[in-house]
Image (cartoon, grey):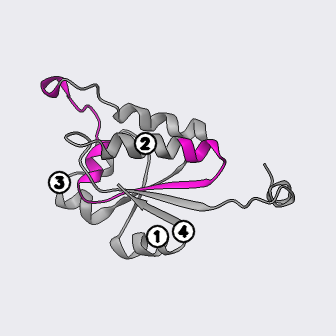
Amino acid sequence: MSDEMDMEEGGTIKKFMFVNRKAPYGTIYALESLEVVLISAAFEQDVSLAFIDDGVYQLMKNINTDGIEMKSFSKTYRALEGYDIEKLYVERESLEARGLSEDDLVVDVQVVGAAEMADLMNEQDVVLSF
């Protein structure tokens, strides 16, 4: 949908950033965030995701969930590109504090420092934290 068509219909495209701060399992936050992201994309909004603190664990490769009797949903992040969600940001300091690198993640992301992450958040119309 072009901006011109969007304006004619009276709507505007908003910039949404979903900030994921929680570990992927043990709470519903990570899975709920992923569902809200997909819904937002379906409404053709400008969607980006940020992974900070323990949220970086949501993107880890080869997560074994056998012991908690839950299905791993980390591979679902690979499907985001099909919904035109390509802006995935991971805070460098959060990765480093957990001994992780970009190679440990299941999808391609843009690794940014805390200051740049703050700038990205300030550019958004809506920031939702999970």
Distance between mark 2 and mark 1 Cα atoms: 18 Å
Task: Find out whether residue 67 is within the magenta segment.
Answer: yes
Residue 107 placement (x, y as % from top left):
41, 41
Q: Which of the numbered marks, if any, corresponds to residue 99?
A: 3
Q: Which residue is at a point 65% across and 46% down the rendered structure image?
A: 43
Q: Secondary structure at mark 4?
A: loop
Residue that extends furthest to the left in the rendered view of this protein: 67
Tell which tag, 2 or 1, sits nearer the viewer.
2
Q: Secondary structure at mark 2?
A: helix
Whether tag 3 and tag 4 are in contact, CB under 8 A, the answer is no
Could you tell me the amino acid type at mark 3? Gly
Which residue is label 1 attached to? 121
Whether tag 4 and tag 1 are in contact, CB under 8 A, the answer is yes
Q: Secondary structure at mark 3?
A: loop
Query: Which numbered disc flags the more N-terminal residue, 2 or 1?
Result: 2
Distance between mark 4 and mark 1 Cα atoms: 5 Å
Distance between mark 4 and mark 2 Cα atoms: 18 Å
Which residue is label 4 attached to? 124
Could you tell me the amino acid type at mark 1? Met
Distance between mark 2 and mark 3 Cα atoms: 24 Å
Q: Examine the image and state in which quarter residue 65 appears.
A: top left
Closer-to-camera residue (77/16): 16
Segment colored magenta: 39-68
Could you tell me the amino acid type at mark 4? Gln
Which residue is label 2 attached to? 34
Task: Find out whether residue 51 is within the magenta segment.
Answer: yes
Closer-to-camera residue (94/29): 29
Query: Which numbered disc flags the more N-terminal residue, 3 or 4?
Result: 3
